[in-house]
Image (spheres, rainbow, N blue to C red):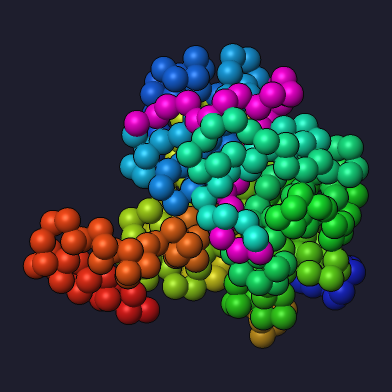
Amino acid sequence: MNKLLASTAVLICLAATNAQATVTFSTFVSGPSIAAVEGQNATIAFNYAGNEFVGSVYVGVNNDQLYSTNLTGGNVQKFGSPIPNGFSGEVVVAASLGQAGFAAGDIYAGAGTQIYHYANSGGAPMLFGTVPDGATVRQIFFDPGSSFGGNMLVTTTAGDIYKFNSAGSPTLVASTGEDTEGMDIATSAWGSFAGDLLTASEGSGKIRLVSPGGSITVINPTNLITEAETVGFVPLNLGVSGNPIEGLYMANYPVDIQFAPASQFAGLQGDAVIAEEIGGGPSPLIDVHYNAGTNTFSFTQVGDLPDQAEDGIFVTAARIAPFVPEPGSLTLLATGVGALAGLSLRRRRSQSLGR
């Protein structure tokens, strides 16, 4: 066992084999369908926007042109106009969740030091904000709860973590001192760390918990995770929504988009899953389990992505909820197909919300 002195506690981290799932992926968006639209399929980012998915490709042709798919991974087409700054690196994307003054389902793309805002329908991007440290945006994430006020969170190559409000004004949350990328919010299963931001640093493999007040706790020795990329928490209410969209979506560079449905994560509720970026693949998927009774973290490989893991998103009931029509809207929609159909739709809607 290894002991790490963190900023808030001494934590014991150990390799273990207590995970109960073997996660397997399947193709969600094929490489040829992306290449037919973009001219290439070097997939980098992929995100859920309620009525669609939006992704990006890396360097080369159409690097600054986003693409969209429908909710089953089909109907791939260009999304909006290209990002205007001629950036030639990794373009990251996120979708807003209807909190803290942000609309539900708008798209935000990070390219270089800048973040651009698209309407959910696409169109021309508008400059939203710039990171103050002059570094490159590595990830954009919207807080689905309240610990960070439902705002936008941004990580950079300098290791700074910013909170942006809906007016595009940034506030520094914390500085890790090294390139920081993937992030997600810890579930209530993580005890006193619930609501903290879990972040990953690819270069060192370090995983950090960042509190809303900026306190940082490193939770792993570097020999357990070497190239941490994407972070996602398995919800405690896994699959309760009944929506087949729930699950983990990953850019499988440079091939396609891969998907593991919610059923693949049974037994891992409350845990974090970390995808490592391994050039040429396969890229291990690591389960991180917190034991509140002993204040320990265990790390267990539970699957592999076929190729090199890049950005992705764990779509959960909390992320789906902002895009579910209100009952009144469904009633109006149903009036065009007859009273009986409307009654049936309302009855099914009532049952689906029984959670």
Query: How many numbered callouts?
Result: 0
Q: Is residue 156 visible?
A: yes
Residue 243 placement, left or right of 210: left
What residue is drawn where x is 51% and y is 43%? 120
Residue 287 placement, left or right of 26: right
Say if 77 sits above or below 214 in the image: above
Q: Nearer the viewer, residue 261 or 53?
A: 53
Residue 99 in percent (x, y) is at 61, 63
Q: Is residue 136 visible?
A: no
Q: Is residue 78 magenta?
A: yes
Residue 273 placement, left or right of 175: left
Residue 341 in percent (x, y) is at 12, 63
The quarter of the displayed image where residue 197 is located: bottom right
Q: Quadrant of the C terminus?
A: bottom left
Magenta span covers which residues?
75-100
Magenta portion: prevailing SS class: loop
What residue is drawn where x is 60% and y is 24%? 82
What residue is drawn where x is 47% and y is 26%? 78
Residue 346 in percent (x, y) is at 22, 71
Q: Quadrant of the N terminus?
A: bottom right
Say if 193 sits above or below 259 in the image: below
Q: Nearer the viewer, residue 337 or 179?
A: 337
Residue 46 in percent (x, y) is at 53, 40
Say if 5 sits above or below 295 in the image: above
Residue 304 placement, left or right of 88: left
Q: Is residue 155 magenta?
A: no
Which residue reaches farthest bottom? 293
The quarter of the displayed image where residue 218 is located: bottom right
What residue is drawn where x is 49% and y is 73%? 236
